Amino acid sequence: MIDIFKLSESKNIIVILLIHLLLLSLTGCKRQKPLIVDFPINSLNRVMSKYNLKMDNEISYDGLGSIRVESEDTTTAYLFVLRDIPVKRAKIVWEAYCKSKDLKGEAFLEMGIQIRRNHGKDIETFLNRSEDDISGTTDWKKIEVEFMVLDNKVNVVQLNLIIEGVGTIWVDQVRLTVLPIK
């Protein structure tokens, strides 16, 4: 005859051992923290190209100033760049607050990514645009563009503002977030 209490004791010991092994394995895993880089708009010093860009100290989302782009045709504003992202597998997110006035057409954020492959011999370039865009006259709106990097280190990540039309756009409170993924 089987003793139920001894069987129950054996199961408890096995469960306790499994929990202990799981906890030991988890303590050995270091979780990478997200990388967050803010680009405060209180000058145009960090902007890649100042063509068609002006500093606006009066209209601002956060009160520190904003970038104003006045477009008379399709325009690309090259805003910010960050090099050598120290994460190989990550979700990269650029976010910015944008506002528009009398924009006939649309404006959106674009992320450019350069990834080196084959031990640095090959370079691949990717472009991704935000799902949200703005047009007409709008109040401040948070716009995001993201990209998933699964197997290689990112050499360059760049933020552009694309304006397809005529009007004025303001950009403020820009942030790059790199979230490690497993």
Image (spheres, rainbow, N blue to C red):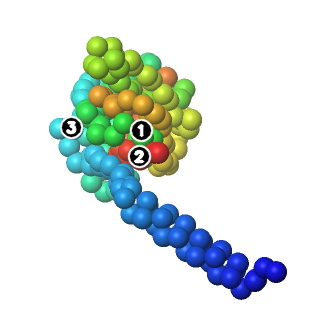
Above or below for 32 versus 171: below
Q: In the image, 18: left or right of 169?
A: right
Disc 2 residue type? Pro
| Quadrant of the rendered image containing residue 74 | top left
Can you tell which mark lies on residue 178? none
Q: Position of residue 169 (x, y in %)?
A: 42, 36
Tell me the distance, in whole angstroms, between the alpha carbons under discs 2 and 3: 25 Å
If you read the primary sequence from the N terminus, does the residue marked by circle 1 or circle 2 appear first? 1
If you read the primary sequence from the N terminus, does the residue marked by circle 3 or circle 1 appear first? 3
Tell me the distance, in whole angstroms, between the alpha carbons under discs 1 and 2: 6 Å
Disc 3 residue type? Arg
| Quadrant of the rendered image containing residue 1 | bottom right
Can you tell which mark lies on residue 46? 3
Task: Assign a secondary structure to mark 1.
Answer: loop
Cβ atoms at labels 1 and 2 below 8 Å apart: yes
* Residue 66 appears in the picture as rendered: yes
| Quadrant of the rendered image containing residue 70 | top left
Q: Position of residue 175 (x, y in %)?
A: 35, 46
* Residue 170 appears in the picture as rendered: no
Residue beneath disc 1: 89
Q: Nearer the viewer, mark 3 or mark 1?
A: 1
Q: Position of residue 168 (x, y in %)?
A: 42, 34
- Identified at 27% across, 19% down, the residue is 120
Q: Nearer the viewer, residue 57 or 85?
A: 85
Task: Assign a secondary structure to mark 2.
Answer: strand
Residue beneath disc 2: 180
